Amino acid sequence: MVSLQLEGRTVLVTGAGQGQGAAEARLLVEAGARVIATDLAADMPAGLGGLSSASGGALMYRRLDVSDASGWSALASWMQSRGWQVDGLVNNAGITQRSRLLDATVADLQRVYEVNVAGSLLGIQSLAPLMVGGASIVNVGSVAGLTAHYPVAYTASKWALRGLSQVAAMELGPRGIRVNTVHPGFIETPMTSGARPEFRQATLAETPLGRTGSVEEVAGGVLFLLSPLSSFVTGAEIPVDGGQSSHGGAKSVSDALR
């Protein structure tokens, strides 16, 4: 079996309380990493309790609002006080907002932006000083950031995250820090569980593989980008979407919901 070479590495995952973030945290622990899992809940979510692995992986939980600069600063100080360097950061936390173009407000855009974009920026700014060459940052985008998807606030935030990721890859590359993005498609998560049946049907019709994805399938891509197996990969954008973004089919999804 090929090792991901994550044993003993310290990786922080935001939005790790459920869904994709929880899956990423679990697989990282199984791969031997020390995982700092963060989310909004005061106490560790039940799904993260008791995680450990024979390869030495372990998980600790910290409450974090990714849009709060002081919270990031406190978290970085806490890690630094323990003498830990940061080997990986997964900016997974995200929220959605489904208003359409003519109904969306500036407040809608700002609310989503604060979490999906500013939260990722704060994470990079806070933890990059604790990183050395070989560290890896993975930002979790969306097929909405590759297409003209209909929820305008969410879509705009994921397009902005792409720009942030590319600038970070350029700026941090000389320090040996890699920055990449994964773009999940329709993944079975608590966020997508409330999607209307019409949305599910239309999206599956646009997905060449003909099914939804699992959180573990997204997590597998994230782990690859965190590992030394991807040591010459930076500035990359990897769709994990069953082919949904490969043919520009967002219009039919939008039309089906009118």
Image: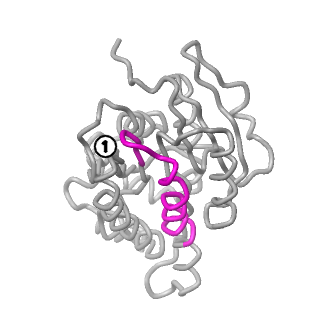
- Which contiguous range is marked in magenta? 114-137
The spot of residue 42 in percent (x, y) is 80, 50
Taking the magenta stretch, the answer to whether it contains residue 224 is no
Residue under the image location 31 percent in, 56 percent down? 169
Residue 98 placement, left or right of 47: left
From what the image shows, is residue 100 above or below residue 129? below
Q: List the single residue furthest toward the right.
A: 43
Q: Nearer the viewer, residue 15 or 132?
A: 132
- Quarter the N terminus occupies: top left
Residue under the image location 30 percent in, 30 percent down? 229
Q: Which quadrant of the structure image shows residue 254?
A: bottom left
The figure's colour scheme reads one colour
The spot of residue 123 in percent (x, y) is 53, 58
Residue 66 placement, left or right of 143: right
Please, what is the three-letter code of the amino acid marked with disc 1?
Answer: Gly
Q: Which residue is mark 1?
A: 242
Q: Nearer the viewer, residue 118 or 127?
A: 127
What's the magenta bit mostly, secondary-structure-wise? helix
Taking the magenta stretch, the answer to whether it contains residue 120 is yes
Mark 1: few/some/many CA within 10 Å (<14, 14-19, 20+): many
- Quarter the C terminus occupies: bottom left
Residue under the image location 59 percent in, 35 percent down? 35
The spot of residue 188 in percent (x, y) is 51, 43
From what the image shows, is residue 171 above or below residue 237? below
Q: List the single residue furthest toward the left.
A: 247
